[in-house]
Image (cartoon, grey):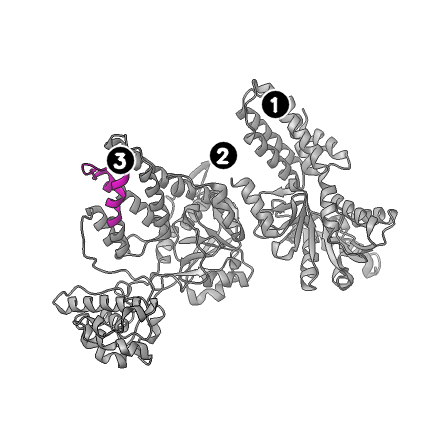
Amino acid sequence: MDICATYQRKLEDDQISPPLAAILTLTELCASSTAGTMFELVKALNEGADALKQSSTNAISLNAGCELFIAFVTLFPHDSASFSDLKMELVKQGETYVRQALTYRQKIGELAVDFIKDDSVILTHSYSRVVMETLLLAHRSKRISVYVTEARPRGLGVKTAEALTAAGIPCTVILDSAVAYAIEKVDFVLVGSEAVVESGGLINAIGSLNIAIIAKAANKPFYALAESYKFHRLFPLSQYDLPSHNPRILSFPTPSEMAQAAENQMSSASPGSRSASQTLSSITQEEIAKNNPDVDYTRPDLISLVFSELGSLTPSGVSQYLVGMFAG
Amino acid sequence: MADPTTTSNEPSASTSGSQPSGSQPSQKTMTKAERRELQEKQRAAKLAQKQTGGDTKPKAKPKPARPTEATSSSGADASRSHPKDAAASTTVVEGVTSKSRSLRIFSHFGLPKHGPGVKGDIHPSIIRLALQFSEFRICGANARCIATLTAFKTVIQDYTTPPNNTLSRHLMSHLSPQITHLVSARPMSVTMGNAIRQLKLEISGSDIDMPEQDAKDLLCQKIDDYIRDRIIIADEVIQDLACKKIKDGDIILTYARSSVVEKVLLSAYKQGKRFSVIVVDSRPLLEGKALLQALTSAPPVSWTLSNDSLLPPPPPIPCTYALLPALPSLISEATTVILGAHSLHSNGAVFSRAGTALVAMMANQHSVPVLVCCETYKFSEGVMLDGFGKNELAPSHLFQTSPQAPNLEILNPLYDLTPPSCITAVVTEVGLIPPSSISSIPMALGRISL
């Protein structure tokens, strides 16, 4: 079976986030595998997970799902009569888990709504399903207004703004660089997450760290929303310690590339005197995005609370939960 | 001495021979603290008498601090200068107290009693080990724990249960004096304490009906397992985990010498990572020199065959050696700080070689991540708030570097306490853990039996 195609197919469902898609893909792999022993099965699953990681550009949240499922399989009590029964049982359990996991956003929303006061001004970043769910839930009982950052380079903030405006929530898109300007007007910051890591920190779309630092400086609470399947056994020491970091990110152009760029500029400048704006436009958005990271890591000391379906946790509470889950 | 209550006790202390109880008010009217003080004084007086009676054995450890008490300061004084004449020194103590004031708050720090007399039935291997401890030939939490357990194996093998007794009940009473002897050589480390507690548990749990030799073999087997599981294998896992945090081009800063950190750096080098190391060191132990030696002379350099081409041997690890005062100018260069630990407390504070706290705080100030490599068997359930409550002094006769001057007391605490806020992560065999979550590990890990 083509594991990557399955994964992409699963992702097409709007409600399914990457970790859940990874779990579903691995359950299918489990169902179709010909493995006769636990060892073979776990090996096949690990290979499948590696293939998925290879295919994806941003493997962090996907990895969290794979890790969860493989840990579940290895710890599953084998008391079935035959191995094929056990496999069916695993598949059933995996699917049940995903069904259950889809209700988590609702639970998180209910938890977080209690922290939203009437007439609040909320700042959010980019697009997140669980943040949308929470805001829509809050809108039913409270008057809220939302600032959302544009979130370059993908510009997903616009998607959030459209959805919120359609639901009747006053919403303004602000530039990523305007967060510091806007923070005084904001009551608190609410963001989703790609993954929550062992230090209690957060991995999220690029720009979250900026917002967290600005919120800390302005003494505004910074809340993160994360389903527990996004909890990930990873301990980044710095931004460059993330698995998504590669040498291309933030690299300077090599001398040959610089010579090339200078040549292009010269040739475009030679026909006549061009204006400065046109020479600037020789650097395209794609070129900028190429040397930039997709995600960043927010340190635990910048986060006020993490809402998950397990409860409202402080960052150290998250790390205690993770230590208890994986170190046991 | 200004205190009126102690002046009333004064004669009993200075006239060391007489029984002081006669000159005292009735014991019932005294508070508990006063009674204890009196008792301690009697003991000190007895000891002083013994010493004047020709026993030249030096009295090493000063009595617990009792600031205005004449006997206590005379005891401390005696250990330094004239152990023979404690009674006489009480008369000059007024002049000395002001000068020795600085040491008084540290007088509770453990100091190795050099030249411990052998009392009772001590096994030769323990006597040997105690000497190695007191001379700092065996130094470091892991090394001391392994050496102790290995010595106990010999003790257990040479032990025979006396008639009308059982091994599970009697062996511990045989081991207790051995442990006391070791502690008299150098205060017990947390690692030894944890290991001995496990050993006690195993001994008391051993089967009464088992033949003696089998029971002894089983205990030795358990000791070997403990060393293997909790120290050797744990170190290997820590090496793997910490190596992942070392990348090409990194500059690793470390302080003094930790056996685990040394292994981590060497194994990262063996994996082909190209990084450099700054070894920060400090007097009096200068342990960093040994680390520097190990890193620079490290691997057997040879040509390696890869893809049918012969590759030249990698250059050795580039190292910088500096003393602690140079730290501020070096810390901004470092990408990661990796430290070792003597023990780790449940609030996440790290008890480690004196100077570690300084390095960790400075790194924290410069936003350099601080990793502490520490096996879970070094965890201590207590909480420590600073390095003053409990510490150990480096024996001045071993690390004497400055000329001896009268009235100059050298204070060399061996350990200090790094607050958890200055530590990014603790590398243990169960993973990288933020210091705030340390308390949740022992429960998750369970007490792995010896």
Helix, strand or loop at disc 1? helix
Mark 2 belongs to chain: B
Between residue A21 and residue A156, name the one nearer to us.
A21
> Looking at the image, which is closer to me, B228 or B261?
B228
x and y, in percent, of residue B438 in the image: 50, 50
Tell me the chain of label 3.
Answer: B
- Range drawn in magenta: B154-177
Q: Where is residue A146 in the image (x, y as percent from the top left)?
A: 81, 54
Where residue B234 appears, as percent x and y from the top left, is 43, 42
Q: Which of marks 1 and 3 is in front?
A: 3
Magenta span: chief secondary structure: helix
Of the pair A318 and B15, the residue shown nearer to us: B15
The tag on residue B172 is none
Q: Residue furthest top?
A: A82
Task: Please name the residue that numbered disc 1 is placed on.
Answer: A87
Instruction: Give the secondary structure at mark 3.
Output: helix
- Name the residue beneath numbered marker 3: B216
